[in-house]
Image (tube, coloured by chain):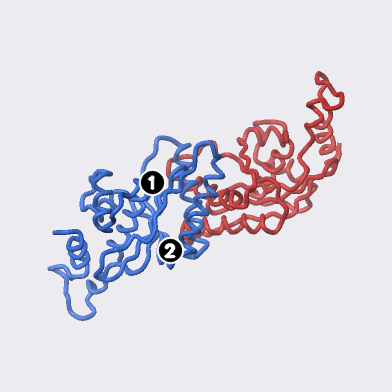
Chain colours: A red, B blue
Amino acid sequence: MNVRQMWKAKIEGRARPSASAPDGPGAFTLKRTPFVGQVLGIDPSLRGTGLALIEFMPGRQPVLLRCQTVKVAAKHPMPYALGEINRAVADFLDGAAVFHVALEQTIFVQNFQTAQILGAARGAAIAAAALRELPVFEYAPLRVKQAVVGAGRASKEQMARTVMAMLGHGRRLAPDEADAAGVALCHALTWRG
Amino acid sequence: MNVRQMWKAKIEGRARPSASAPDGPGAFTLKRTPFVGQVLGIDPSLRGTGLALIEFMPGRQPVLLRCQTVKVAAKHPMPYALGEINRAVADFLDGAAVFHVALEQTIFVQNFQTAQILGAARGAAIAAAALRELPVFEYAPLRVKQAVVGAGRASKEQMARTVMAMLGHGRRLAPDEADAAGVALCHALTWRG
């Protein structure tokens, strides 16, 4: 099964009513179509925020429209980094027709200080989306792996490989961009709009 | 000693060279003048961010130009609250000639989740300042109390009372606005520009 087939099977698997569900007109499962439109996936961190803008069209392989890692050198102070994250997210949103924004939840970090800094990076990113009145969705890392790879215990490398295969993307994505793309894919695959 | 005298003594105490320092022309202590200009003090939290814009002029009592508590009801999701914080800070900054932004550091919170949410509120606030290329300063709560009240162990009520006295402010400030004003006062009082 090649990449395109893999993706098609995923979409059809979700669009098709399950064996036990009624599939007459107006049945609930008919609403369970995959997401259609553009999703901005964000993997926020103070010094390397991953951004991936993906377009989903019915029955077609998703397209990576744009991706970026917002790198901020350690010599720049924290407020500067937060401004850059905010600006980059705003730039992605203003230059596209994004429907939804998706972020991975931070589940555990070493200490209070790190939690706060990661939180600040998330806040700077989310604020840009909220100001534009875009719905923001958060997913636990386990859920992202399950939705994308099909296994909650998938390694970072497996995730990146599957993401790149799903997008049929030629060049290798940077790790933070692959994570951002992963959460955008998770959003589209698990969407129950 | 009335409020105006108290403030004057504080300013003069800082502007005057200390007993042991040289006070000839060009001596270091001559640079230790108090801050002049507008400072936006911010006390960020997800549901009740305090904002206080204070103007400092040489030898005069500081003036509270504007204050606000950004209240966001619990029924609104977290991203909405972050957008409101970002918008309110931007609104204060765009409508004034702010030189510096000052925030109180969060020293300790109960758990990881709270640390992250507080961090996000800070991030949303700081990003608005950073985008406008305004310098952002952070102060430990102990330092704010020491600078404003003169005692690191001052109670919240003592802080609020002293802040209101310094500003000669008629109406009672809301607690979050008093905290925001406190950190702005701390910035101006300890400024070594």
Please state the horizontal and vertical placement of residue A33, each as a whole percent of the image.
79, 35
Near mark 2 (Cα within 10 A), the count class, few <14, some 14-19 or many ≥20, is: some
Quadrant placement of the C terminus of chain A: top right
Is A58 on the left-hand or right-hand side of B27? right
Q: Work out whether residue A38 or residue A134 is closer to the camera in this orientation and state it.
A: A134
Residue that mark 1 sits on: B106
Residue B102 visible to the viewer = no
- Label 2's element? loop
Quadrant placement of the N terminus of chain A: top right
Please state the horizontal and vertical placement of residue A116, each as a whole percent of the image.
46, 45
Q: Looking at the picture, which amino acid does disc 1 mark?
A: Thr
Subunit bearing disc 1: B
- Residue located at (74% from left, 48% from top): A38
**Quadrant location of residue B186?**
bottom left
Q: Give the CA distance from mark 1 to mark 2.
A: 19 Å
- Label 1's element? loop
